[in-house]
């Protein structure tokens, strides 16, 4: 039988990356193989995001290009999933006659069945119904990485005034703790070493369902054999409990990094955003985190140019950045999202002003990140190897493995690039003579001496392969 190929274009956040992997897994069950070449595809899936205006524009521009592709190849099937699909539903089919299926964020578990219906009947389908429990529980992946995401909950109950997530992904629903633990256990059997637990607000995990608290879930995950590292995202500051802060003190697998979106340094703007905390409360939580875990890296999200943000509000944001000294920031210029309360707020900031504020903020953060990275020069870090660095992929590697540049991450989520030599300085005994082939290197733990620091990464020299994050002599690298 001729193989069928699916090409998936993913826009947006980690939740969408996770969903795309589930999409591929679903389609693999009915004979599709993933292809990186759009021209080979029998089915093209666009997994959309509507959280930022730019991502939504990208989605429609990509779909525009597919119209001409479908003219040349009429049998091609086109699917649109994700937040824009959930929001727009049949409007997409009306506007785009070349689209065969629109499926929402809750319909991924039914995608294979729907694609088979289209193959048989050449019909067009909109499936944006809310998932049944079975659909949510059936999440299983066939593709596996050393480091991967596992979703623990869907949706959000918070209704920040600028955000479409509760409108497109629905209310918060948590998965059963036992199912999450079982999924991670199964993944470790086939090579998972680092898991990132995913949810829009992991801090309120299980509360509505009275399953268990998020710190209790972390303890259960921490007990999984052969799992080395745990990360989680995203945390709402208002729900960051002392119990979760203490988890950084007690759980040896919990990485020393938290992404804690603050969005603004101005209490007036935070109120208009409906964030339900003040900058003082945020700073108290940061202090408590640093008390529990002195080397913890803290990253955050900021929105500049929120409606009504004055120069003084913006200065409050810059002051907060200086006071907290974030390890990294994702900053965005505010844009109206359809249907959310902030889109109806007056006093919109003009585009030129938003751009200027964004650039000022990014310049400040770049200096601070560089300073923090420079403080690591000379330190020895434990790095989980993720693969050949992107920089290396785009350059000529024709001289073989000997000088390839690799990349990995520290517990604090800093990117470390290093040159992977075929022979020592790596510890030959620990590596069992198998350190050089690419497939053996991914997932290796290395101690690396940091030699140079840049704004977004570190450069180091590998010292030794470790057999586990707990060290050869029982030394625990992650203990606070
Ligand atoms: S917490 Fe706020 S910003 Fe985050 S997903 Fe929920 S509504 Fe959106």
Image (cartoon, helix red, strand yellow):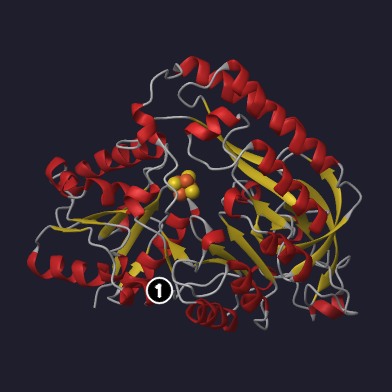
Residue 122 position within the rendered picture, expressed as x and y whole percent measured from the top left = 9, 62
Q: Residue at x 12, y 57 (%)?
A: 124
Measuring 64% from the left and 39% from the top, which residue is drawn there? 329
Measured as percent of width and height from the top left, residue 468 is found at: 77, 76
* Residue 293 can be seen in this image: no
Q: Residues within 10 Å of mark 1 (few under 14, many from 20)?
A: some
Seen in the picture, residue 21 relative to 419 is either above or below; the reply is below
From the image, which quarter does the N terminus lie in? bottom left
Q: Quadrant of residue 88?
A: top left
- Ligand 1 near label 1 (Cβ, under 8 Å)? no
Count of marks overlaid on the render: 1
Residue drawn at x 57%, y 18% as measured from the top left: 356
Q: Is residue 447 visible?
A: yes
Which element is circle 1 on?
A: loop
Q: Give the quadrant of the C terminus.
A: bottom right
The picture places residue 85, in percent across and down from the top left corner, at 27, 50
* 100 and 430: which is toward the camera: 100
Using the image as rendered, state which of residue 61 and residue 325 is in the foreground.
325
Above or below 217: residue 316: above
- Relative side of 322 to 358, left or right: right
Q: Position of residue 13 (x, y in %)?
A: 47, 50
The answer to whether 106 is drawn above or below residue 69 in the figure is below
Horizontal placement of 136 versus 127: left or right?
Answer: right
As rendered, which of 325 and 121 lies closer to the eye?
A: 325
- Left/right of residue 297 with respect to residue 12 in the rendered view: right
The residue pinned by badge 1 equals: 139
The quadrant in which residue 294 appears is: bottom right
């Amino acid at each position: 039988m001729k193989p069928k190929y699916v090409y998936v274009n993913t826009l947006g956040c980690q939740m969408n990356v996770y969903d795309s992997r589930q999409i591929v897994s679903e389609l693999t069950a009915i004979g599709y193989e993933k292809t990186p070449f759009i021209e080979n595809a029998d089915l093209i899936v666009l997994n959309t995001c509507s959280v930022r205006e730019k991502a939504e524009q990208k989605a429609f521009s990509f779909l525009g290009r597919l119209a001409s592709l479908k003219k040349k190849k009429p049998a091609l099937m086109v699917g649109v999933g994700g937040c824009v699909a959930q929001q727009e539903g049949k409007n997409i089919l009306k506007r785009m006659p070349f689209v065969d299926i629109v499926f929402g964020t809750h319909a991924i578990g039914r995608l294979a069945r729907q694609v088979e219906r289209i193959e048989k009947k050449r019909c067009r389908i909109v499936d944006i119904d809310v998932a049944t429990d079975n659909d949510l529980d059936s999440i299983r992946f066939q593709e596996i990485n050393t480091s991967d995401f596992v979703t623990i909950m869907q949706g959000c109950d918070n209704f920040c005034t600028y955000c479409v997530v509760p409108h497109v992904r629905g209310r918060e629903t948590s998965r059963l703790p036992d199912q999450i633990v079982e999924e991670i256990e199964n993944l470790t059997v086939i090579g998972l070493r680092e898991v990132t637990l995913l949810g829009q607000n992991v801090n309120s995990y299980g509360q509505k369902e009275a399953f268990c608290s998020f710190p209790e879930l972390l303890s259960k995950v921490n007990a999984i054999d052969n799992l080395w590292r745990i990360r989680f995202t995203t945390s709402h500051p208002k729900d960051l409990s002392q119990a979760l802060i203490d988890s950084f003190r007690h759980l040896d697998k919990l990485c020393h990094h938290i992404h804690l979106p603050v969005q603004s340094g101005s209490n007036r703007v935070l109120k208009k955003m409906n964030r339900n905390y003040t900058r003082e409360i945020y700073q108290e939580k940061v202090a408590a985190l640093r008390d529990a875990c002195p080397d913890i890296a803290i990253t955050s999200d900021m929105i500049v140019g929120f409606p009504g943000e004055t120069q003084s509000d913006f200065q409050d944001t810059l002051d907060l950045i200086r006071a907290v000294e974030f390890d990294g920031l994702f900053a965005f210029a505010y844009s109206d999202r359809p249907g959310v309360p902030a889109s109806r707020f007056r006093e919109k900031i003009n585009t030129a002003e938003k751009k200027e504020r964004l650039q000022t903020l990014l310049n400040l953060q770049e200096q601070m990140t560089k300073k923090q990275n420079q403080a690591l020069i000379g330190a020895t870090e434990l790095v989980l190897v993720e693969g050949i660095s992107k920089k290396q992929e785009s350059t000529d590697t024709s001289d073989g493995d000997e000088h390839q540049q690799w990349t990995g991450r520290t517990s604090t989520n800093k990117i470390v690039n290093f040159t992977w030599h075929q022979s020592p300085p790596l510890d030959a005994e620990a590596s069992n003579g198998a350190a050089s082939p690419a497939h053996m290197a991914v997932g290796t733990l290395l101690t690396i001496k940091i030699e140079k620091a840049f704004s977004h990464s570190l450069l180091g020299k590998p010292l030794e392969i470790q057999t586990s994050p707990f060290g050869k002599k029982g030394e625990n690298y992650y203990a606070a």
